Amino acid sequence: MKRILLLSVLLVYVQVLRAQEENFVDPGTDAPNGRVIVSHICYFKKPLQDPTDVDGDQYCDCDVVNSPMGLPEIKIDCRRNQLSDDFWQEYEQLPQGTIRLDLSHNGLTLMPRLSGEKLRYLNIGHNQITTIPDKVFANVTQLKELDLSSNRIETLTTDALAGLSYLERIDLSDNQIRSIEVNAFSNALHLRQLILSNNSLGTFFNRTEADLYLRLGVTNRLVILEMERCNLTDINLSSGVGLERALLGYNRLQQLTKLPKQLALLDISGTPIRSLSAKFLPHLLHLKTLLLQDMPILYTLEEYALYGLPRLTMLTLQGSRNLSTIHPHVFGLNVARDETATKLEQLVLTGTNIRTLNSTLKLAFEKLSLLDMRGAPLRCDCQLRWLRELPNLKTHGLCVKPNALRGKAFGMIESQQFQCRAEQFWIYTVFNVLLAILLIVLLSIGIFLIVRAIRPKPHVQLRTVGASSPYARVTIEPNRAEVL
């Protein structure tokens, strides 16, 4: 079986080699029909596993594999090959069957014009490219993924992506994009993921105040939008009826009122707000995951701040180190009154300043299966007993107070150990009462003795009583009474 597989791979390799030899044109000569066949990207005459092949030579790593249909496919890896602009011809015809080309981490400053009818994945990230010429991708129309991250692109024109109607993912992060022309993405009819993070687009969107979809020509097929660290204060995504995941963290957002209702994941981590109010988020009826991580000055989740999120199952506030208060009615009074149920299953408070949680949240936490409070200064007293008594809840965290429970895992403490001072055992109460009575008695005796000691003594004069003394006792005999 192994021999048959090896023979089939060798046969495919020979077919590709013959195709390259038949189409080979020396770059130094004029090519027929104006085509230039790349001969210096892959050197198919050399065995693919040649032990003498060393990194840094003039050839890229080219692997030939079998597709599910049995046809040969080529994956070309040119990463860190020190390629420069003069490496390319005016139009580079990729080897027949090329589906993947990686040109990242080179010294390119100009966008190479490539031609390949089967190219699906193109990575030109981590170069020094400053502009994307119009229709530069016109000869790679089957492209599905395009990575242009970590370049120096400043503007995206309307025709820059012309011909890429099958494009599903484009990464333009870590560039210097400050403006995007109208309908710049209108050619990408099947675009599902758009990454614009780490570009200074705040001024552009704040100035236009237009819907991102309507202005840039983004279709409703877009599922994932990433715009982190773009200096945004607000963004309009109202027309994104197909959007499911929006990553908008580390911006200067003050509110987000124009989001699509069917959004399932929202990341607004790193937002510099002091209090999450009820007006910050709209009612997102399909939101399941909300990320509020690393919010440096967030202190409070206000009343009704999470109202209108009936399908919210995961909420994480990890790293929001100043968060100390979660309002008892953060999910609304309907939940507190048991008129509306929540679906919250995971709550992450790792690294926050939460010390206690109000028992009013009990109804909102009934379906909670994981509560992570590691790093929070928990006060494990009677006010948190309700949390320990919730069934099927796995809790992570260590108690800081009272001293008797310091350092103990929250989930390992029995519910009766969550005590407040007013709930001490009766024996301690009786002992305290008896001790108080004893102290009162001792204090009274002490006061009596002190008063008796300092009271002045009465003057007493002692006299000698004898037979001749006027104070001697006189006895009258009865038989002499008549004489007297």
Image (cartoon, helix red, strand yellow):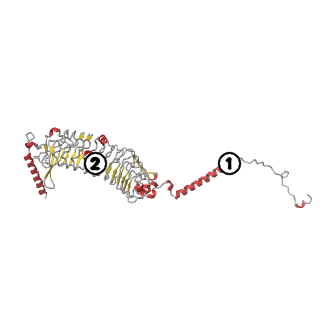
Q: Which mark is residue 380?
A: none
Q: Nearer the viewer, mark 2 or mark 1?
A: 2
Which residue is disc 1 drawn over? 453
The amino acid on which the numbered mark 1 sits, given as a three-letter code, is: Ala
The disc, 2 or 1, on the residue closer to the chain's N-terminal end is 2
| Residue in the foreground of this view, choosing between 189 and 266 | 189
183 left or right of 432? Answer: left
Nearest the eye: 209 or 400: 209
The residue under the point 11% across, 52% down is 12
> Can the viewer see residue 275?
yes
Q: Position of residue 362 (x, y in %)?
A: 42, 57
Q: Which of 461/192 is in front? A: 192
As helix, strand or loop, the secondary structure at mark 2 comes to strand
Q: Position of residue 36 (x, y in %)?
A: 11, 42
Q: Residues within 10 Å of mark 1 (few under 14, many from 20)?
A: few
Question: What residue do we see at 72% from left, 48% from top?
Answer: 457
Q: CA distance from mark 2 to mark 1?
A: 91 Å
Residue 242 percent location from the top left of the image: 27, 52
Give the residue at x 42% y 55%.
333
Query: What numbered label is drawn on residue 225?
Result: 2
**Local crowd size for mark 2, using a 10 Å CA cut-off: few (<14), some (14–19), many (≥20):** some
Residue 91 found in image quarter: top left
- Going by the picture, which residue comes out furthest to the bottom? 479
